[in-house]
Image: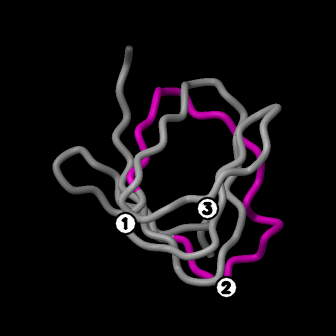
Amino acid sequence: MSDFPFTQSEESGILIREFSKDVDSGELVWHRDRQDRKVLVKKGEGWKLQMENSLPVDLKPGMTYEIPKNTYHRVMKGTSNLIVEIEEYDK
């Protein structure tokens, strides 16, 4: 059993994460990241990203979302598997 609600690999410094459509919504918790991130959605239907003090937004394949470091956020479960590419960087 993994400590995280996703599987992850890395290619050329880019993190590739896959969230199962069968993940328990309770595992998708509010959290903060230590670095700024650009998240490119490769695949997924019905998933949402919710940032602190904001309403959820749809995660759309082909779109990139920026998550500033130390900002509370969470992913909300969709109807198919979600695959994202994550690039971490320092401003």
Q: Is residue 47 above or below residue 38?
A: below
Marked residue nearer the N-terminal end (2 or 1): 2
Crowding near the residue tagged with mark 3, few <14, some 14–19, many ≥20 C-alpha atoms within 10 Å: few
- Disc 2 to disc 3, C-alpha distance: 14 Å
Q: Which residues are magenta?
A: 19-40
Q: Which mark is residue 4?
A: 3
Q: Is residue 33 left or right of residue 26?
A: left
Q: Nearer the viewer, mark 3 or mark 1?
A: 1
Q: Is residue 20 above or below residue 89?
A: below
Q: Which residue is mark 2?
A: 22
In the rendered image, residue 35, in percent from the top left (x then y), is placed at 48, 27
- Disc 3 to disc 1, C-alpha distance: 20 Å
Marked residue nearer the N-terminal end (3 or 1): 3
Q: Residue at x 82, y 32 (%)?
A: 53
Q: Which residue is mark 1?
A: 42
Q: Residue at x 63, y 67 (%)?
A: 47
The colour scheme of the drawn protein is one colour
Q: Is residue 69 above or below residue 49?
A: above
Q: Is residue 52 left or right of residue 75?
A: right
Amino acid identity at mark 3 = Phe
Q: Nearer the viewer, mark 2 or mark 1?
A: 1
Amino acid identity at mark 2 = Asp
Q: Nearer the viewer, mark 2 or mark 3?
A: 2
